[in-house]
Image (cartoon, rainbow, N blue to C red):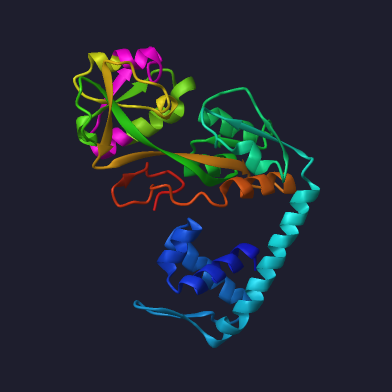
Amino acid sequence: MELRQLRYFLTVAEELHFGRAAERLLIAGPSLSQQIKALERDLGVRLFDRDRRSVSLTPAGAALLPHTRDLLERADDLQRRAARISGSEPVRLGYVNWVPADLTARTSAVAQLHVDTWIVPSHAQAGRVADGSLDLAVCWVRTTDLTDLDLRARLLGADRLYAVSTGEDTSEVHARDTAVLIDDDTGSWSSWNLFAEQLAQDTGARPVRISDGGIAGPAFFDHVRRSRRPIINSPKGQTTALPPDLVQRPVIAPKVYWTWSLVWRRGEVRPAVLATADTLTESVGDLGIHEPDAWLPADDPYTR
């Protein structure tokens, strides 16, 4: 029996609906159902009566619910106390090009956060966490990466990507009518290339091979000027001001999202690191990535 399973039990008991509970917990519905069944086996009682139409607490589940809530509140209090004690412990965090604007303010009560100034691509930052060079990183990862590097991840942010084109037309553009750049430099653009290739395959966007690093910066704008199609902007260019001869166009059918994960080692036990992860991700929410018309790569950790 794990605290995580008890949190799952509490959430299902509050929602009385496995689908809604899974959405709150940001996990897949089948996984939630399996965890509840495992908890029922460990406790030796059935917690829920369920059929295709409804979910209800059994008498045993109803009797155990207040004790579960009390236990989780005490566990949360213990974690907060440990976090305050460890507040002077340094925690090293790396990122690619985005972090929450209030990063330091949100973590000051639980850790002495050191933000690493070495800006490297997502796959490199994830590797640095895996080898111990960093405690946490904000990066784009796949479920495959988490398994291979033995990392955990939680959703921290999401960028809805737009297209850039010449002219004055700022109307919505279907993904199939856009182009997406893929660079030969896999050392710098490995994560983006994986994302872009999947996007092209799934939506019909036209993949355009380049070799000049023009995924972002002035070279990207030059590619837009030469292109007959709007080109999807990368996360690295999300906040870059456009030249006056170019315009931003929303991408639809589907809306394209790039997720930012906070990652740490699966075996991490230091309270300051775990408290920092909890503090940064506790109120993130859905960020639009699970809307019916949203697109994520199939191997994104938050795909449903």
Give the quadrant of residue 116: top right
Closer to the camera in the image, 224 or 126? 224
Q: Which residues are magenta?
A: 199-222
Percent position of residue 39, x then y: 58, 72
Q: Is residue 31 left or right of residue 197?
A: right
Res 288 visible: yes
Compared to residue 130, the image places residue 37 above or below, namely below
Compared to residue 26, the image places residue 74 above or below, namely below
Tell me what residue is drawn at x 48 percent, y 21 percent: 188
Compared to residue 201, the image places residue 77 above or below, namely below
Tell me what residue is drawn at x 44 percent, y 59 percent: 23
Percent position of residue 275, x then y: 68, 49
Closer to the camera in the image, 193 or 234? 234
- Give yes or no for residue 278 being in the magenta stretch: no
Which quadrant: the N terminus? bottom right
Percent position of residue 249, x then y: 26, 30
